[in-house]
Image: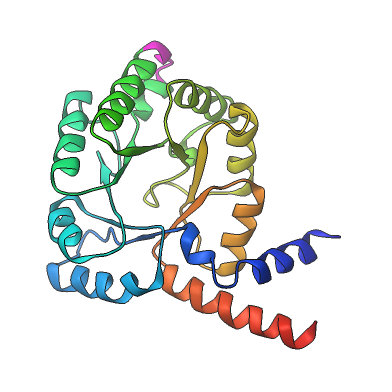
Amino acid sequence: MNLYNIVLSKLYEFKNEISKFIDQTFLKPNADEKSIMKFIEESDPLNFRSLVIPQSYVKLASEIAKTPIVTVISFPLGYSFTESKLKEIELAAANGAKEVDVVSNIILIKSDKWSQYRDEIHSLINIAHSLGLKIKVIIETGLLTRDEIIKASRIIEEEGADFIKTCTGFGPRGVIVSDIILIKMSTRGKVGIKASGGIRTALDAITYILMGASCIGTSSGISIVKEAEELSQNLVIHR
């Protein structure tokens, strides 16, 4: 079976399940309360894995949404003090978040300060887990070399993160297939992978899941769910 048929087969299998893989995201810098409320209202009925929103709206969202709320930490650049990130994680937990997506300090990677990088990752994971939160560590793959992706991923897996996340969506590029393969190979599949950045179609989402992604980060979750339903109906017609 070729890749085309594999993707279509998986799409048919996931036709009513794809939303459960999606972290439906709303992180626009010009967001206001009205637009966030509308986002929750439209997204909540679709059974997404989570809704990802700015920190300042976590409390409001967690009070009205049935979907688990995730927020971002040190977003999107990641070079704030570790102590600041730890405080942000504490506030996220206190206001009702169930998970945090934390941007790691890329400067430490680029400066070849791997011991300091590991220290930060250890601290971030430790506090998140102590507060009952799952944690995804963002490495911004578009800024890293192949070897840097491998080394950062191994450290994050060894320190016990729940997921490695590829991109913020604000970097030089979004996720590419080789990112998922490199992370999967370097961690021996021992950590979840969140593919994020530029995923806008159901076929893209299914492809990344097939490549090894555990979940998908996208602001296009609603249209992806609709597209998956439409494509699966066409598949039934032509089977």
**What's the residue at 19%, 65% (across, down)?**
31
Which of these two is toward me, 165 or 232?
Answer: 232
- Residue 188 coordinates in the image, percent (x, y): 63, 29
**What's the residue at 51%, 28% (across, down)?**
153
- Quadrant in which the C terminus appears: bottom right
Magenta stretch in the rendered image:
111-115
- Residue 95 coordinates in the image, percent (x, y): 14, 48
**What's the residue at 59%, 30% (across, down)?**
146
Q: Is residue 70 magenta?
A: no
Q: Is residue 143 left or right of residue 65?
A: right
**Numbered circles on residues, count:** 0
What secondary structure predominates along the stretch shown in magenta? loop
- Residue 185 coordinates in the image, percent (x, y): 65, 31
**For the view shown, which residue lies furthest in the right direction?**
1
**For the view shown, which residue lies furthest in the top direction?**
115
Q: Is residue 2 left or right of residue 40?
A: right
Residue 127's quadrant in the figure? Answer: top left
For residue 53, above or below residue 102: below
- Quadrant in which the N terminus appears: bottom right
Residue 121's quadrant in the figure? Answer: top left
- Residue 206 coordinates in the image, percent (x, y): 61, 61
